[in-house]
Amino acid sequence: MTYLEIKLLSINDVKEFVTMATLCPFDTDLISGRYTVDAKSIMGIFSIVPSESLKLAIYAEPEECADFTAAVLGKFGV
């Protein structure tokens, strides 16, 4: 499992992130405090506070998801 810290500051960020996550073949979750939502669910992300720092959990080994991790960190990394 891999964890990243990201920020989604606008509605467009959320839409772009969900598009990226949907193309990822691994399961992904976003964690905000005690809440965990499916990172591929735009409604789930809007149910938490996306402007706060979020923890992205990727259920894959780091070497398996290196391309996705680099893309997410390049666009949304804290």
Image (cartoon, rainbow, N blue to C red):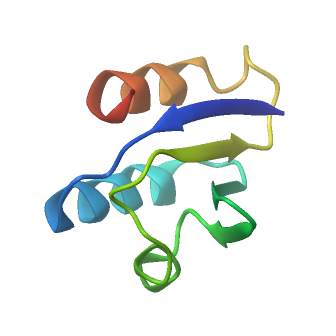
Locate the N terminus by quadrant.
Answer: top right
Residue 73 figure quarter:
top left
Q: Quadrant of the C terminus?
A: top left
Q: In this rendering, would 64 be left or right of 56?
A: right
Answer with left or right where residue 65 lies relative to residue 2: left
Residue 35 place in picture, x, y as percent: 70, 70
Q: Position of residue 29 (x, y in %)?
A: 67, 58
Residue 14 rendering spot, x and y as whole percentages: 30, 62
Q: Is residue 23 above or below residue 36?
A: above
Q: Which quadrant of the structure image shows residue 34?
A: bottom right
What residue lies at 70% left-to-right and 48% top-to-bottom? 26
Q: Who's the residue at 45% across and 19% down the image?
A: 70
**Residue farthest top in this picture:** 63
Q: Residue at x 32, y 52 (%)?
A: 8
Q: Which one is nearer the viewer's eye here, 66 or 29?
A: 29
Q: Position of residue 54 (x, y in %)?
A: 53, 48
Instruction: Pick whichever, 54 or 3, lies toward us.
Output: 54
